[in-house]
Image (cartoon, helix red, strand yellow):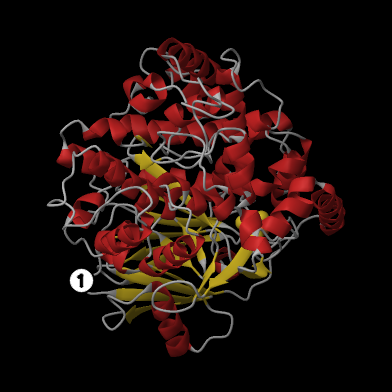
């Protein structure tokens, strides 16, 4: 720790083939310009990964980073990011997880951990402060996530050790494999496959160093103020603690914006049966679970006895899983969703991408693009939850049709062909989460331009849902997206949980400035912080432009442009091509990017010091 700010003070570089490590002081310039977390991950990835490198080749690098807020009293700041070139999109992806792993890395003395190369044999890393060991993982290869975590904890015998591991999906290079840290998933973009390609089964970490806070008094004041506001806010004070994120199912269904049956509809008749309220009221929840330092506690541990093969306990299912394995599959069997949630964690696979890819296969089957011969005789109709779970296992182990679907929905559709491409619900290769694009015009633009592809974490659907913006308006959505993305980039760099946006706001403001200055002591102004957000997001874009991305890639699935929502409260809504074009023009202009190519201009790069 530096003694002048809340950074850990060093970056750990691990080279797997040579089994060597080196430490570098965290550069002052990196801190000031990129803040931490997301900013560190994209800067290190940009500098280290050769343009054109295959994401599953040794030359890809995997960057884990924490924010300067981790380990301090700033609420909900224990998260970490994994950044790399994604095997799903071929672009930069940053993927986040909660739990204690991030704080352990910080307290071990590291702001970031960079992993390069490929180990000749399966290995896991043990990081205990200054001690870093490469340990054989041959006996763990093939194991499910939680079994591997338990074995590692047993072998290391270090109290407080936190283990981030991959499962069979990562080992088998499923392009949307996740990394599971404790029970929390860094799910998006296939970071688990990058780890699998490196033959790195797990990273176990424990830290015992204190985190220095320059202004302790100010930190206490900010903490007390935040705590009061989080408790008073209806979302963070009541809905999330009581119902969890599954509260979205009924709410979005009422709005006519709950994607169902592979986005053919946005109302699901079985919504009530798979809602967060049903999970709560029917005794599925056995307890709440919060990340360290979080007064909200959106996590819910659920159990069920009603699944073939016996009882199941899982942390979840979150809204996104209720969407991807529920409404998207036309599945109102809650027990099966709980089971799928647990299996996704055990296999180490992203629930969103897995569910959306299976939904695609179901639609292709119902449209007779896939035949029973393709599915191994399985009737892959919507609602067949047993088939979905069998297919999930086939994906993780790359068996039969599962081998094709393990490539992600975009590649799977290209392999299957026969017109199936128009049923592949993704942006830039990343499967879409459960937030309406046709119902929320700004979200449609957000999906189209997101550096990660189909994500709701760059532009937030909550901005338009909050009522601050007309969801159907087109004008102003370019600027709205830019400003919201700059906020998410700063919060992902600090790193603080998205659910604090209810009190800190959807756009950068004085709360963000206070937080940044409390942990960095850098004296940022609001304008400085806006520049940090813009710099981080623009560098992500630059990474992608370097890989060949341009305006033509900022697009949406045909379904959103050609098929109006067929029923429900948002019936008739669609994204007109001319509206998308207008929003794109406005967005690039707001960003200072060339509207013809979508690339950042030289003037903008100079202004941002890139
Ligand atoms: S709100 Fe949920 S995800 Fe966010 S920090 Fe708290 S428990 Fe973790």
481 lies above or below 26: above
Quadrant assignment, res 558: top left
Q: Badge 1, how many Cα within 10 Å: few under 14, some, many 20+?
A: few
Task: Name the foreground residue: 212 vs 229.
Answer: 229
User: Is 369 on the left-hand or right-hand side of 298?
Assistant: left
Task: Name the foreground residue: 240 vs 27.
Answer: 240
User: Is 76 on the left-hand or right-hand side of 458?
Assistant: right
User: Is 152 on the left-hand or right-hand side of 176?
Assistant: right
Say if residue 129 shows up in the picture: yes
Q: Quadrant of the N terminus?
A: bottom right
Q: Quick check: which quadrant has ligand 1?
A: bottom right
Q: Residue furthest left?
A: 373
The spot of residue 548 in percent (x, y) is 28, 29
The residue indicated by pointer 1 is 120
Q: Residue at x 36, y 28 (%)?
A: 557
Q: Residue at x 31, y 57 (%)?
A: 194
């Amino acid at each position: 720790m530096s003694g002048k700010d809340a950074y850990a003070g060093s970056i750990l570089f691990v080279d797997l083939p040579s089994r060597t490590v080196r430490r570098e002081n965290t550069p002052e310039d990196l801190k000031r310009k990129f803040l931490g977390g997301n900013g560190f991950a994209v800067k290190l990835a940009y500098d280290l990964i050769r343009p054109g490198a295959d994401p599953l080749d040794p030359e890809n690098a995997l960057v884990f980073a924490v924010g300067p807020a981790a380990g301090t009293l700033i609420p909900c700041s224990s998260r970490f990011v994994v950044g790399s070139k994604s095997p799903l999109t071929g672009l930069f992806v940053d993927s986040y997880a909660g739990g204690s792993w991030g704080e352990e890395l910080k307290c071990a003395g590291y702001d970031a951990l960079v992993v390069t190369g490929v180990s000749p044999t399966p290995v896991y890393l043990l990081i205990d402060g200054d001690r870093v060991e490469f340990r054989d993982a041959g006996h763990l290869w093939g194991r499910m996530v939680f079994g591997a975590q338990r074995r590692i904890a047993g072998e290391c015998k270090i109290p407080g050790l936190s283990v981030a591991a991959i499962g069979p999906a990562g080992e088998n290079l499923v392009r949307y494999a996740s990394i599971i840290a404790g029970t929390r998933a860094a799910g998006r973009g296939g970071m688990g496959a990058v780890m699998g390609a490196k033959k790195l089964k797990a990273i176990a970490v424990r830290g015992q160093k204190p985190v220095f806070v320059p202004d302790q008094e100010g930190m206490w004041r900010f903490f007390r103020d935040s705590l009061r506001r989080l408790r008073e806010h209806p979302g963070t004070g009541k809905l999330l603690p009581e119902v969890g994120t599954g509260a979205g199912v009924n709410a979005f269904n009422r709005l006519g914006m709950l994607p169902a049956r592979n986005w053919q509809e946005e109302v699901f008749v079985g919504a009530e049966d798979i809602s967060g309220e049903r999970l709560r009221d029917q005794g599925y929840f056995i307890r709440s679970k919060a990340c360290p330092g979080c007064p909200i506690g959106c996590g819910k541990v659920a159990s069920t006895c009603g699944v073939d093969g016996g009882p199941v306990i899982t942390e979840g299912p979150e809204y996104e899983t209720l969407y991807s394995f529920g409404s998207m599959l036309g599945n109102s069997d809650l027990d099966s969703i709980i089971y799928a949630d647990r299996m996704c964690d055990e296999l180490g696979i992203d629930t969103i991408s897995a569910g959306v890819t299976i939904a695609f296969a179901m639609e292709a089957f119902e449209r007779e693009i896939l035949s029973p011969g393709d599915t191994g005789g399985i009737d892959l109709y919507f609602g067949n939850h047993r088939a979905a779970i069998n297919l999930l296992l086939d994906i993780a182990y790359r068996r039969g049709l599962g081998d094709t679907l393990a490539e992600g929905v975009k590649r799977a559709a290209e392999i299957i062909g026969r017109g199936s491409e128009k049923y592949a619900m993704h942006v830039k290769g990343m499967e879409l989460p459960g937030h309406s694009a046709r119902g929320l015009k700004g979200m449609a633009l957000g999906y189209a331009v997101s550096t990660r592809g189909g994500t709701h974490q760059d532009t937030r659907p909550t901005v338009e849902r909050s009522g601050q913006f007309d969801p159907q308006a087109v004008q102003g959505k370019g600027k709205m997206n830019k400003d919201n993305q700059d906020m998410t980039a700063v919060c992902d760099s600090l790193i603080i949980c998205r659910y604090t946006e209810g009190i800190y706001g959807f756009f950068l403001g004085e709360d963000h400035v206070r937080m940044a200055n409390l942990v960095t002591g850098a004296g940022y102004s609001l304008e400085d912080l806006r520049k940090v957000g813009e710099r981080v997001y623009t560098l992500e874009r630059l990474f992608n432009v370097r890989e060949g991305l341009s305006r033509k890639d900022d697009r949406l699935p045909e379904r959103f442009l050609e098929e109006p929502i067929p029923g429900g409260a948002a019936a008739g809504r669609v994204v007109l091509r001319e509206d998308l074009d207008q929003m794109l023009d406005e967005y690039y202009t707001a960003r200072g990017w060339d509207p013809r190519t979508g690339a950042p201009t030289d003037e903008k790069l100079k202004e941002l010091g890139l």
